Amino acid sequence: MTRRRLRQLLSASDGVTALEFAVVAPVFLTMLMGVLDIGHMIYGQSVLNGAVQHAAREASLETGDTSAADAKVLAQVRPVLPDVTISSTRSSYYDFSDIARAEAWNDADGNGNCNDGETYTDENGNGQWDADIGVSGNGGANDVVVYTVTATYEPVFRMPFLPDSWAQRSLTSSTVRKNQPFANQETYGGEAGACG
């Protein structure tokens, strides 16, 4: 090969654009899909947070219907997260300071668990010692309710070359509300018991 022919080959630029596109396009598309996917997830979380706040506010009234509140959350989230399913939990407490508090007990062995015949006060009236005094459900007048919703959905923007990112995702939102004082609030029970 002559020097002149070699110089011509080195200075030729035909097809360089196509080659550069072939190298850059997969990286660019993966980054673009990733940004869209993260943006969609953040937007979905924001809509879920707003829907949960609104539903908790409506369910805090005497006439509050928890099933209707859950249905409203689903209706508000579904346009953003297609094929979404939701699950919800509600735990009610007498006061804000009771959230995640254990029932009172005599922790004789100091291990943080009610066991070996230690005595306790059955404050929530379910016949057993509980590490969380909360009662499942929407509670009554003046009760504090922790409302949590988990939304499970299939991602809309699927990342090319990363099939693991196509799996189902879950978003969770919680809020704490105090029910309206539509009646006298029930107090905690005082029955005594012993742990086994």
Image: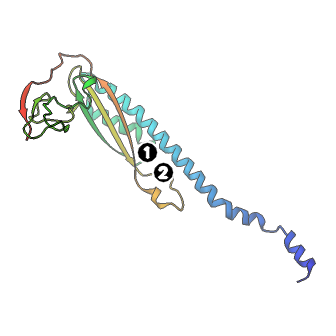
**Residue 116 location in percent, x, y?**
9, 41
**In the image, 2: left or right of 117?**
right
Q: Position of residue 41 (x, y in %)?
A: 48, 44
Q: Is residue 1 above or below residue 104?
A: below
- Secondary structure found at label 1: loop
Mark on residue 105? none
Q: Residues within 10 Å of mark 2 (few under 14, many from 20)?
A: some
Q: Quadrant of the C terminus?
A: top left
In the rendered structure, which amino acid carries the disc numbered 2?
Val
Depth check: 195 or 39 in front? Answer: 195
Under circle 2, the secondary element is loop
Q: Name the residue type under label 1.
A: Leu
Circle 1 crowding by C-alpha within 10 Å: few under 14, some 14–19, many from 20: many
Q: Quadrant of residue 28?
A: bottom right
Q: Residue at x 92, y 78 (%)?
A: 3
Residue in view at x 29 percent, y 31 percent: 146
Residue identified by numbered label 2? 156
The residue to which callout 1 is attached is: 81
Left/right placement of residue 53 relative to residue 122 reads right
Contact flag, marks 2 and 1 (Cβ < 8 Å) = yes
